């Protein structure tokens, strides 16, 4: 008996620790730089195309034929430049406002408001543009571009340091430059925007739009609304990629660039004391073909309990996804051919990831649910069973069942019939078993069954 218990505990342990990220192809677009959840509380996605288009991805992965927005006439799409960010006003349902971040001719960073059509809010007229913010920049690279509304109702904007290498103009540490910053503005204004009175440099030296500084190229940041932390993935110069995590209510954080790349000195000429700076919660180097971080989200969905509370991100070059648990990164195997450019989160808090090749994937875990079904709804009956067991309230195809005896040994692997979702158990001997329901070899759920 002791030996049997040992086998069982090992079987369960291996299941707990064999968690893996898997990607399920979902949709195909072009040049994806951002994925934003639908503003109308459904599971559509709005996919940003760097060339200046925004496309609607329906919940089944099809692409709406009509673009949501087409501003290719004013977007400078070249290298790292282009249309990079999209955020919907929290009151979009009533005002139809949304905000974009792009480079226009001459590299200028532009943050603008557009208004969706009242008769058909699935399209927007490019003529509704209201330019809010224009920031000249000296070089083509490091454009930042991530924009989101915070829990405070303000629009947060990450800008890059202006480009080249090593921040030659010292923008990151210059509190009078809007480059290399996290900006925070109040869009509920008749002027282009208002300054939130709680911004840290209001009334003192430093640009009033700045919330935090010392960033090189925050290539994607996100809010974790559960903890109200902001997570900023800052792309390194040559050696080190950063993940920063700070309470969203903490102003004037100096993330250290170009004095520090990660925790290492880069160029400390003219720099403040390191004790005044906030260093990353975790960093990684370029070993194993890694080159550039793509920031993601803390998973808050209900399908993959093992991912909850962990920060999911990627490396552009190694095509791997990282799972950050406290200060430990677990890397997936490489998804070869996919240079990951952005993550997205839908209104069910499920995650998506897009690659430069245009593919958008659902991010899933091999543990527990793989299927987008509420596994609490699934019913397995009858118990006890004679010849057939039926699975109710599941509409997925290609389901399989593995039946284990109580020592954990697999005794039957069988397809679930597509027509009536039945499992033929006539060959089983009488007794107690565990049925493991799977899709694509990944477990959805398990339940004890009895064969008469
Ligand atoms: Ca000021």
Image (cartoon, rainbow, N blue to C red):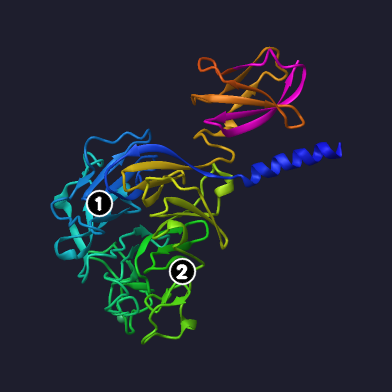
**Between residues 290 and 315, which one lies in front from this camera angle?**
290
In this image, 364 relative to 117: left or right?
Answer: right
- Quadrant, the N terminus: top right
Q: Residue placed at 21% from the left, 72% from the top?
A: 138
What residue is shown with label 2? 249
Asked if disc 1 and disc 2 are in contact, CB closer than 8 Å, the reply is no
Question: Crowding at label 1, few (<14), some or many (≥20) Cα neighbours within 10 Å?
Answer: many
Provide residue 302's location: percent of width, then percent of height: 54, 43
Helix, strand or loop at mark 2: loop
Q: Residue placed at 55% from the left, 40% from the top?
A: 366
Please determine whether, in this image, residue 171 is positioned above or below residue 5: below
Our reading of the magenta stretch's main secondary structure is strand
Magenta segment boundaries in residue numbering: 423-452
What residue is shown with label 1? 50
Does 77 lie within the magenta span? no
**Between residues 8 and 26, which one lies in front from this camera angle?**
8
Question: Crowding at label 2, few (<14), some or many (≥20) Cα neighbours within 10 Å?
Answer: few
Provide residue 157's location: percent of width, then percent of height: 33, 64
In this image, 212 relative to 121: left or right?
Answer: right
């Amino acid at each position: 008996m002791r030996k049997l218990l040992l086998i069982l505990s090992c079987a369960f342990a291996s299941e707990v620790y064999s968690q893996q990220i898997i990607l399920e192809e979902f949709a195909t677009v072009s040049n994806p730089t951002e994925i934003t959840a639908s503003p109308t509380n459904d599971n559509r996605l709005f996919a940003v195309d760097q060339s200046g288009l925004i496309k609607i991805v329906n919940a089944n992965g099809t692409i709406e034929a009509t673009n949501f927005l087409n501003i290719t006439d004013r977007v400078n799409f070249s290298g790292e430049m282009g249309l990079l960010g999209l955020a919907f006003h929290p009151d979009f349902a009533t005002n139809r406002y949304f905000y974009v971040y792009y480079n226009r001719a001459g590299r200028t960073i532009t943050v603008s408001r557009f208004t969706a059509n009242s008769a058909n809010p699935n399209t927007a007229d490019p003529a509704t543009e209201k330019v809010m913010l224009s920031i000249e920049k000296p070089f083509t690279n490091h454009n930042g571009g991530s924009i989101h509304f915070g829990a405070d109702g303000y629009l947060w904007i990450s800008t890059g340091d202006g480009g080249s290498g090593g921040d030659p103009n010292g923008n990151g540490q210059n509190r009078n430059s809007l480059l290399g910053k996290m900006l925070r503005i109040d869009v509920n204004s008749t002027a282009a925007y208002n300054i939130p009175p709680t911004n840290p440099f209001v009334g003192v030296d430093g640009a009033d739009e700045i919330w935090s500084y010392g960033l090189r190229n925050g290539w994607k940041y996100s809010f974790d609304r559960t903890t109200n932390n902001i997570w900023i993935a800052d792309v390194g110069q040559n050696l080190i990629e950063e993940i920063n995590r700070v309470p969203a209510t903490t102003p004037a954080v100096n993330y250290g660039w170009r004095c520090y790349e990660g925790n290492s000195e880069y160029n400390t000429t003219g720099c403040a004391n390191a004790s005044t700076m906030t260093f990353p919660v975790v960093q990684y180097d370029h070993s194993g073909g890694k080159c550039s971080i793509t920031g993601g989200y803390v998973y808050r969905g209900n399908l993959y309990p093992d991912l909850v509370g962990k920060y999911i991100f990627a490396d552009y070059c190694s095509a791997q996804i990282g799972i950050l648990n406290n200060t430990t990164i677990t890397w997936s195997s490489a998804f070869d051919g996919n240079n990951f450019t952005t993550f997205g989160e839908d209104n069910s808090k499920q995650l998506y990831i897009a690659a430069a090749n245009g593919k958008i994937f659902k991010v899933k875990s091999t543990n527990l649910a793989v299927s987008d079904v509420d596994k609490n709804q699934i019913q397995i009956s009858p118990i006890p069973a004679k010849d057939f067991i039926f699975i109710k309230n599941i509409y997925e195809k290609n389901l399989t069942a593995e039946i284990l005896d109580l020592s954990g040994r697999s005794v039957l692997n069988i397809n679930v019939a597509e027509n009536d979702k039945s499992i033929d158990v006539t060959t089983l001997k009488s007794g107690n078993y565990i049925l493991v329901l799977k899709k694509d070899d990944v477990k959805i759920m398990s339940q004890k069954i009895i064969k008469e």
